Image: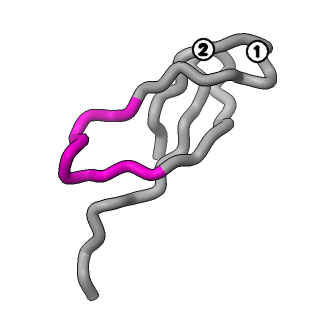
């Protein structure tokens, strides 16, 4: 089988550590962990979400 470059990752809130979002990332172009500012339902505000396993 061919090794794929795009993988599914989950994003966890930096405030409450709740895993809210899942997205895809290209491992060849982005080696660093992904960090996005997204809305968290439990915190009720826009917080930084970091990539987790």
Q: Say if 24 sits above or below 13 in the image.
A: below
Instruction: Pinpoint residue 21: horizontal percent, then vertical percent.
Output: 62, 40
Whole-Å distance between the Cαs marked 1 and 2? 8 Å
Number of disc labels: 2
Asked which secondary structure carries label 1, the reply is loop
Q: Residue furthest bottom?
A: 1
- Name the residue located 67 percent from the left edge and 36 percent from the top edge: 20
- Name the residue located 68 percent from the left edge and 19 percent from the top edge: 16
Q: Which stretch is magenta? A: 24-34
**Within 10 Å of the Cα at label 1, are there few (<14), some (14-19), or many (20+) other Cα atoms?**
few
Asked which secondary structure carries label 2, the reply is strand
In contact (CB < 8 Å): disc 1 and disc 2:
yes
Q: Which mark is residue 43?
A: 1
**Within 10 Å of the Cα at label 2, are there few (<14), some (14-19), or many (20+) other Cα atoms?**
some
Residue 31 falls within the magenta-colored stretch: yes
Quarter of the image where one finds residue 46: top right
Quarter of the image where one finds residue 44: top right
Q: Magenta stretch mostly in which secondary structure?
A: loop
**What colour scheme does the image use?**
one colour
Q: Which mark is residue 52?
A: none
Instruction: Pinpoint residue 32: horizontal percent, then vertical percent.
Output: 26, 34
Q: Say if 52 sits above or below 38 in the image.
A: below
- Name the residue located 30 percent from the left edge and 52 percent from the top edge: 26
**Observer-nearest residue: 26 or 52?**
26
Instruction: Pinpoint residue 50: horizontal percent, then vertical percent.
Output: 47, 28
- Left or right: 43 as drawn, with respect to 4: right
- Left or right: 26 as drawn, with respect to 20: left
Q: Which mark is residue 47?
A: 2
Residue 49 falls within the magenta-colored stretch: no
Where does the N terminus fall, quadrant-wise? bottom left
Instruction: Pinpoint residue 29: horizontal percent, then vertical percent.
Output: 20, 46
């Amino acid at each position: 089988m061919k090794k794929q470059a795009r993988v599914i990752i989950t994003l966890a809130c930096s405030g409450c550590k709740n895993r809210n979002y899942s997205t895809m990332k290209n491992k060849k172009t982005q080696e660093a962990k992904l960090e996005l500012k997204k809305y968290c339902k439990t915190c009720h505000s826009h917080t930084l979400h970091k990539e987790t396993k």
